[in-house]
Image: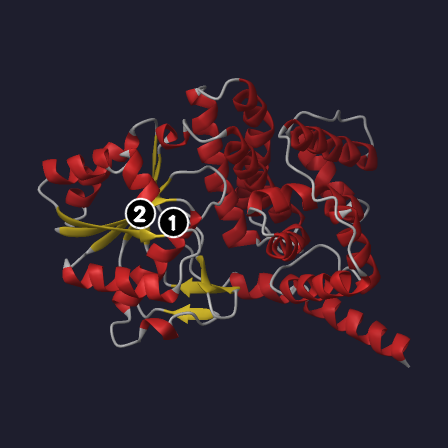
Amino acid sequence: MLATLLAILTLLKKMLRTLPGKIIRHVPMPEPNIINGMGSRSQVGRLCRGSDFGSVLLVTDKTISSLGFQDAIVQSLEKEGVKYAVFNEIDSEPTMQIIDAGRRAAVACEAQCIVALGGGSVMDSAKMMAAGMALKRIPTKLLGVKFLFVPGQTLPMINIPTTAGTGAETTVGAIVTNPRRGSKKATVIVGLDVQHVVLDSELTLHAPAAVTAACGIDALSHGLEGLLADIRNEDDDIYKSRECVRLVMHNLPILLEHPDDVEARQAMCQAAYYGGNAINKQLAGYVHAFAHAIGAKFHIPHGQAIALSLIPVCSYQLFYCSAKLAALARYCGVAQDEQDEVQAAKRLLNEIEQLIKRCNIPPIRKTLSRHEVEKLALKVERDAINYSQPVTFNSKEIKHIIRIICE
């Protein structure tokens, strides 16, 4: 009886697998203007003046403020006569209380645009503030629904990432922490208006090697999982996801040896942006589902959890995705046309595995109890329903992969 019930549940999961991909196709996605180049954040004032933004709120965090990264932006705003206020209270685990404070700061300065300077936490918080400014009668605590519909559009945004990995500069999702429950909740903002994305490699030049590596593998995973997703892809999205993977595989090794290589830094910024496009259009997959559960369990950074999960998960998917992996391997130049699909796919995963090893990502190496594995497996299964993964793992497979990742 139990075996029959489990078989039925697995069948239902397979039937629902393509549903997220069908839903996301109906969510309007930002199509921002891209500003590329070292020091390009100094163009923000000109962008604001060109869009008739008379007043803006610059959202960042104290670390970025202390490094002086915002100075070039402030100077450009002053040069163009654009009024501004700075809100730098974002931390690594933004809550609705922080977002509410930023929303009130935007109201106080009569912001017509929000400029977000930072990593994923800063940009996700700024997205929620931009949505809150458009939904003036909705209390901030009610903004964290699964799908937040904004009639018309949110307040316009200009996003300037300081890391090359999350792709949050263009994604419609935002993650907020609930401190009382010790959990995170994701919101999809329908109507997000990101008008400009500024990819300024200067902001990533002084990132520690570990951050550069983890962010790079995170970006790679977005492109890779986007390509493997069980979803109908447009040619342009396939190109961007392939380029995301290729750019990381070519440029991350350069930065591990020569961290001051500006061209490689700029290429990684572009890769991260393409990875954000993959999240929007193609969604992620089991790599992210495992990484979210593992990261929360052991309190390790997202990029590290992604790096530890990527090869174990993709190896299990190899025979279901060999054609897509082989095509990517040939695109990236790591496999020859005469190699069969399985050989080419294995070659690609081997190259990615070697790159991860070069990144010196710390392993977990912890033996888990049966209860811990079951608890993690449940979290993976719950998270996986948000994606259009290429194959549905059963409970036994999920538990086995968890042990491989952790032990």
Q: Can the viewer see residue 238?
A: no
Q: Residue at x 69, y 46 (%)?
A: 309
Judged left or right of residue 370, residue 77 is left
Place of residue 80 in the rendered image (x, y in percent of width and height, measured from the top left): 11, 39
Q: Residues within 10 Å of mark 2 (few under 14, many from 20)?
A: many
Residue sitting at 75 percent across and 53 percent down?
402
Q: Is residue 9 left or right of residue 230?
A: right
Residues packed near mark 1 inside 10 Å, few (<14), some (14 to 19) or many (20 plus): few
- How far, Cα to Cα, is label 2 from label 1? 23 Å
Colouring method of the image: secondary structure
Q: Say if 190 sits above or below 225 in the image.
A: below
Q: Secondary structure at mark 2?
A: strand
Let me know if residue 184 appears in the view: yes
Name the spot of residue 135 as percent of width and height, x first: 28, 71
> Which residue in the structure is indicated by mark 1?
31
Q: Which sits earlier in the primary sequence, circle 2 or circle 1?
A: 1
Which structural element holds mark 1? loop
Badge 2 amino acid:
Thr
Question: Residue at label 2?
Answer: 60
Quadrant (top left/top right/bottom left/bottom right) for the N terminus: bottom right
Q: Amino acid at mark 1?
A: Glu
Cβ atoms under marks 2 and 1 closer than 8 Å: no
Q: Which numbered mark, 2 or 1, is in the foreground of this view?
A: 2
Where residue 93 appears, x then y in whole percent? 44, 56
Q: Is residue 340 above or below residue 173?
A: above
Report which quarter residue 248 is drawn in. Answer: top right
Residue 92's place in the image compared with 185, above or below, is: above
Query: Residue at (79%, 58%) from the top-left corner?
Result: 399
The percent position of residue 269, horizontal first and vertical second, equals 44, 34
Give the number of the disc on residue 401: none
